[in-house]
Amino acid sequence: MAENDKPGLLTMSWFRPLYRRVILVAIVAAWCAWEWLFNNDQLWGMITAAALAYAVWMFFINFEAEVKKHEDANPPK
């Protein structure tokens, strides 16, 4: 496995339980809502919206594929 193919922080086994990923995404969503609705801060609203989109992509859409890719690359010893 090449050095670039190492599992990332967001695909480590700590995130495997679905409830942990849901809680993390809910926190980011709440922060995004806070910035848009209460602070009316467009810069931080856009930053948190981007973080929310990335979290949804990494933890729900692409998570299983990334974990499987790294499991297949490292057979158990």
Image (cartoon, rainbow, N blue to C red):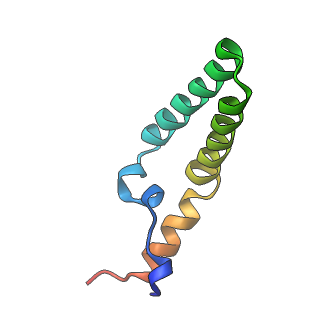
* The N terminus lies in quadrant: bottom left
Residue 69 location (% of width, % of height): 52, 74
Q: In which quarter of the image is residue 42?
A: top right
Q: Residue at x 58, y 24 (%)?
A: 30
Residue displayed at 66% across by 38% down: 47
Above or below 29: residue 15: below
The x and y percentages for residue 60 are: 60, 49
Q: Where is residue 63 in the image (x, y as percent from the top left)?
A: 55, 57
Q: Where is residue 2 in the image (x, y as percent from the top left)?
A: 47, 87
Q: Which residue is drawn at 49% across and 65% down?
A: 67
Q: In this picture, is 30 found above or below 55? A: above
Q: How many labels does the image show?
A: 0
Q: Please give left or right for residue 37 compared with residue 55 in the image.
A: right
Residue at 70 percent of width and 32 percent of height: 43
Q: Residue furthest left?
A: 77
Q: Nearer the viewer, residue 47 or 12?
A: 47
**Is 54 or 68 nearer to us in this picture?**
54
Viewer-side residue, 1 vs 65? 1
Give the image quarter of residue 38.
top right
